[in-house]
């Protein structure tokens, strides 16, 4: 029984684990979403998709020498 509970908890927190391992810039909100709404399938899937998206925001570089 204990092994089953551990496996279920690990599966429940897969989105949070992925966000932590990937050092996602939104890891705290992903973990919060996983904890608060992970019990619903929609909340869990949303957290999973969010954790799998780009881990770091894209940086836009603007060179001022090119501006008129």
Image (tube, rainbow, N blue to C red):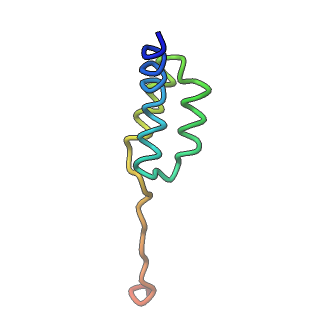
Given residues 4 and 60, the one toward you in this image is 4
Up/down of 7 relative to 18, above or below: above
> Which residue corresponds to the image point at 45% horizontal and 18% vertical from the top-left?
8
Q: Position of residue 34 (x, y in %)?
A: 54, 30
x and y, in percent, of residue 37 in the image? 58, 24
The residue drawn where x is 38% and y is 44% is 53
Quadrant holding the C terminus: bottom left
Q: Nearer the viewer, residue 35 or 46?
A: 35
How many numbered discs, if any? 0
- The residue sitting at 42% across, 83% down in the picture is 63
**Direction from residue 53 to residue 13 in the image, left or right:** right
> Which residue reaches farthest top?
1
Q: Nearer the viewer, residue 19 or 52?
A: 19
Residue at the far bottom: name it. 65
Up-down: is 3 above or below 56?
A: above
In the rendered structure, the answer to whether residue 35 lies left or right of residue 46 reads: right
User: Where residue 26 appears, x then y in whole percent?
Assistant: 53, 48
Residue 33, placed above or below residue 26: above
Q: Which residue is nearer to you in this view: 61 or 64?
A: 61
Position of 34 with respect to 45 (left or right) is right
């Amino acid at each position: 029984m204990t092994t089953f509970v551990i496996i279920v908890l690990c599966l429940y927190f897969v989105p949070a684990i992925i966000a932590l391992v990937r050092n996602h810039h939104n890891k705290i909100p992903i973990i919060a979403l996983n904890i608060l709404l992970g019990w619903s399938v929609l909340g869990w899937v949303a957290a999973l998709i969010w954790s799998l998206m780009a881990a770091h925001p894209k940086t836009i570089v603007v060179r001022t020498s090119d501006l008129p």
